[in-house]
């Protein structure tokens, strides 16, 4: 009995990559293997040499088709076997391996916004809804829009075996969040990409689109981020390592090096308003949602735990943000002997 494998990959669109997928029919007992595609149609090749290769790196049950069908996340490689320039996963692998002994883990909070045509789901056809305030974690048809899609997406992520740890409505109508983790760097990034694909695919069935735009509505509305929670073994055991990690993110050119890779349009979102720090300034503090990096109050009280980098946009590449944080923080902890 044959089965279907949905091959998923990240394309070469700029400044924000998109997800692509296509279906391969495999014989019973056959494992998903490398497959080709037309890179000239995904901003990953020129027409005169258009072949690119999909190399499976993560698979899980397909919760949409069910049965023995699977979802297969792939890296994009060139025909000579080298990583394609758009393949940011390949850059994360050596960093994750180098610092694996520190046991870094992440939890990423993926915010997103539903759109019905040209306006956010729940916005009136003309004008604006009531100001933000009651929508966050709200209940009731006057404040919550898209819950049926959100619940179906959650069911599918769980059926796929993804490490989803929660969902909640956000501060603007039609804006929601799901969380992936805690997981190791490669795992959290792989699973976030698959969860994003499932989100787009689920919303498609309702005639609704999904955007990761960091500022989907201009004006006095919160943007959409991907707050990135991070810890190492040393951070989970002591507070000094927490401070070392926070300090390392603010050293020298690190703040701007990170921010410029935290998603396109970041200066539209990180304005210093709406629970953000300015994009060009670095700060950290306990329980401070206006800081670049927040130390949760419970972490200070317990003297151990994790930190939350609040700067990444909703449209951030999880392979990039995890690589940057691991490389910066783990190197600093290693130098300080806090491993």
Image (cartoon, rainbow, N blue to C red):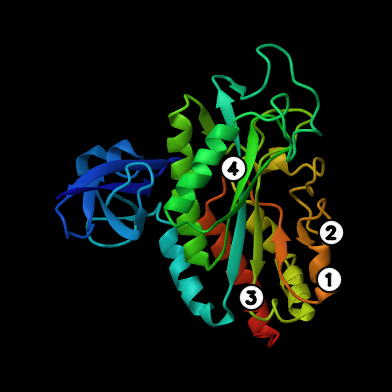
Q: Is label 1 in contact with label 4 (beta carbons under 8 Å)?
A: no
Using the image, tell me which numbered label, if any, was put on residue 232. 3
Quadrant holding the C terminus: bottom right
Q: Measure the alpha-carbon separation of dots 4 and 3.
A: 28 Å
Q: Which residue is mark 2?
A: 287
- Decide which of tag 4 and tag 3 comes sooner along the chain: 3
Q: In the displayed structure, would residue 132 be above or below residue 65?
A: above
Q: Which residue is mark 4?
A: 264
Specify whether residue 216 is in view: yes
**What is the x, y in percent for residue 18?**
44, 41
- Decide which of tag 2 and tag 3 comes sooner along the chain: 3
In the rendered structure, the answer to whether residue 263 lies left or right of residue 217 reads left
Q: Which residue is mark 1?
A: 300
User: Which residue is painted at 64% across and 39% down in the image?
Assistant: 176
Specify whether residue 253 is in view: no
In the rendered structure, the answer to whether residue 225 lies left or right of residue 46 reads right
Q: Which of the 4 image quarters holds residue 218?
A: top right
**Disc 2 secondary structure class:** loop
Instruction: Sort mark 4 into few (<14), some (14-19) or many (20+) by Cα contacts within 10 Å.
Output: many
Q: Is label 2 in contact with label 1 (beta carbons under 8 Å)?
A: yes
């Amino acid at each position: 009995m044959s089965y279907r494998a949905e091959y998923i990959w990240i394309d070469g669109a700029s400044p924000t990559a998109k997800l692509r997928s296509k279906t391969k029919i495999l014989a019973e007992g056959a494992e998903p293997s490398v497959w080709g595609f037309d890179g000239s149609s995904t901003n990953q090749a020129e027409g005169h040499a258009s072949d690119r290769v999909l190399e499976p790196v993560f698979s899980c049950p397909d919760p949409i088709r069910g049965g023995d069908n699977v979802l297969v996340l792939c890296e994009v490689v060139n025909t000579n076997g080298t990583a394609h320039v758009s393949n940011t996963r390949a850059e994360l692998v050596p960093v994750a391996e180098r610092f694996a002994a520190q046991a870094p883990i992440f939890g990423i909070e993926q915010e997103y916004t539903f759109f019905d045509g040209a306006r956010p789901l729940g916005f009136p056809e003309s004008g604006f809804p009531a100001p933000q305030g009651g929508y966050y974690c709200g209940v009731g048809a006057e404040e919550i829009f898209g819950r049926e899609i959100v619940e179906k997406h959650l069911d599918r992520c769980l059926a796929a075996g993804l490490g989803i740890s929660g969902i909640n409505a956000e501060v603007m109508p039609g804006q929601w969040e799901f969380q992936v983790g805690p997981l190791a760097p490669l795992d959290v990034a792989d699973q976030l990409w698959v969860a994003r694909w499932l989100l787009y695919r689920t919303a498609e069935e309702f005639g609704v689109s999904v955007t990761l735009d960091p500022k989907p509505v201009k004006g006095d509305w919160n943007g959409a981020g991907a707050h990135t929670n991070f810890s190492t073994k040393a951070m989970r055991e002591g507070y000094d390592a927490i401070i070392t990690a926070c300090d390392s993110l603010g050293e020298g050119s690190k703040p701007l090096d990170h921010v410029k890779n935290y998603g396109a349009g970041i200066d539209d979102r990180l304005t210093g308003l709406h629970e953000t720090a300015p994009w060009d300034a670095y700060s950290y503090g306990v329980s401070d949602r206006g800081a670049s990096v927040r130390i949760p109050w419970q972490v200070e009280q317990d003297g151990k735990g994790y930190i939350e980098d609040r700067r990444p946009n909703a449209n951030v590449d999880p392979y990039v943000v995890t690589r940057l944080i691991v490389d910066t923080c783990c190197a600093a902890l290693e130098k300080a002997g806090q491993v």
